Amino acid sequence: MRLLCLLSLLLLQACEIFGSSDDPAANTQQFAIETQETAYQAVAAENDDRFFSFEITATFTNLTNVPTYFVGCRPPQQPLLDIKAGNEWEAVYQPIQLLCLSEPLRLMPGDTLSLPHVYGACYPNNNCGPTFDGPVTGTYRLRQFDVYYDPEGTKPVDVESLISNTFTLTLP
């Protein structure tokens, strides 16, 4: 009987330490950035065959247990795009960034923020920008880059805490 009581207490403590899967308040979100869709279609520009665009609706959630700060010019900046290349992720698109410094935007733990979601780019090997530095069709993730643990922008949040779920992007 004592052994049964001891095992029950240990199980109860383990549930408190590691959390219970039956707890509705438990955070099940895996990624700081969540896109609304798992597949997106790029659209070619009507009057210029060098350009295409696409929209990605996404939200950023501060999954850390401390406040984080978006630092830069009118934060948040548009997320970068990484493409899956074998077992690695490669940056293929970075929006043109404005060179100013605005008041940092603070995001408390658990708070959510909508991210800019319209992307416009040039096809690879064209003399215009911003461009894709690789194939357009593929498996992608968003990566936020302007998030810090301090409002001065000296302690960046780990990259693993700034990525999205994966999604596909195709050209028509």
Image: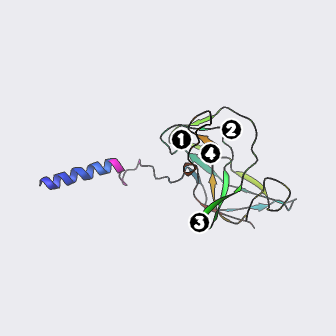
Give the alpha-carbon distance from disc 4 to disc 3, as whole Å: 29 Å
Give the alpha-carbon distance from disc 3 to disc 1, as whole Å: 32 Å
Residue 77 placement: quadrant: top right
Q: Residue at x 40, y 50 (%)?
A: 24
Residue position marked by numbered label 4 in the rendering: 114
At label 2, the amino acid type is Gly
Give the alpha-carbon distance from disc 2 to disc 3, as whole Å: 31 Å
Residue 75 within the segment the image draws in magenta: no
**Tag 3 or tag 2, which sits nearer the N-term?**
2
**Tag 1 or tag 2, which sits nearer the N-term?**
2
Nearer the camera: disc 2 or disc 4: 2
Within 10 Å of the Cα at label 4, are there few (<14), some (14-19), or many (20+) other Cα atoms? few
Nearer the camera: disc 4 or disc 3: 3
Residue 135 as seen in the image, left or right of residue 30: right
At label 4, the amino acid type is Ser
At label 1, the amino acid type is Asp
Give the alpha-carbon distance from disc 4 to disc 1, as whole Å: 10 Å
The image position of residue 123, as x and y in percent, is 80, 61
**Tag 4 or tag 2, which sits nearer the N-term?**
2
